Image (cartoon, rainbow, N blue to C red):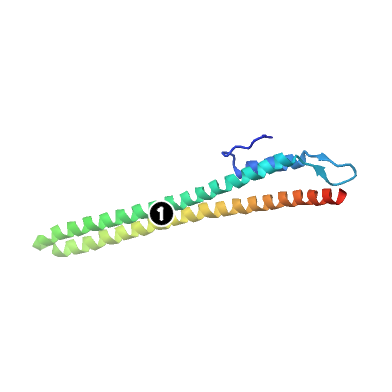
Amino acid sequence: MTENPTRGESLLAILDELSQLIANARPMPMSASALVNKAEALALLEAAREVVPAQIQEADEIVAGAQQVVQRARERASQLKREAESHAKQLVEKESLVEAARIRAQEITAEAEADARRLADEANDYADRQLAQLEIELGQIRKQVKAGRAVIQARLTTEEEGA
């Protein structure tokens, strides 16, 4: 067990350490209670509090990354549309190819819009999957923290009753 948990540790690692601290605590005779090093337990809880904002920031970065992908897709679609319009304009200037230019421009525009929608959908799906996974992990972490706090609270209550 680490005496001073570092900020780089994951919340799950810190919670594992807290679980080990409780599991390895010296048992009280004829009781379900155990003696836990209060300073060490509080240090682990403080480290956990410091790590959670980092994981929330990671989720924000995932969302920002997805937004960048969507923005690039829109820019690419806009570029393709401009190119299609430019190409169409050149074709229109040639009298014999007017109709072909209009049809091709519509096809290119439709392809660009379809590509942009597909890229945006993929970016949104990716962000949703990442956030769903983070939501699951945070739910598990929340349960572990709640259980750890309940154990500590039960010990404190037992110690107060025994005093």
Q: Which residue is mark 1?
A: 67
Badge 1: residue crowd in 10 Å (few <14, some 14–19, many ≥20)? some
Identified at 57% across, 39% down, the residue is 7
Residue at x 71% of width, y 40% of height:
39
Q: Position of residue 93 (x, y in %)?
A: 10, 60
Q: Position of residue 19 (x, y in %)?
A: 72, 43
- Write the residue at 35% across / 54% down: 71
Q: Nearer the viewer, residue 152 or 141?
A: 152
Helix, strand or loop at mark 1:
helix
The residue lying toward the viewer, choosing from 45 and 98, is: 45
Q: Left or right? Give the position of 111 relative to 98.
A: right
Say how many tags the image has: 1
For residue 138, side relative to residue 98 (left or right): right
Residue 63 appears left or right of 132: left
Residue closest to the far right = 30
**In the depicted structure, whether residue 10 falls above or below residue 134:** above
Q: Label 1 amino acid?
A: Gln
x, y percentage for residue 12? Answer: 63, 44
Image location (x, y in percent) of residue 162: 87, 49
Q: Quadrant of residue 67?
A: bottom left
- Quarter in which the N terminus is drawn: top right
Residue at the front extreme, as displayed: 163
Foreground pick, 141 / 117:
141
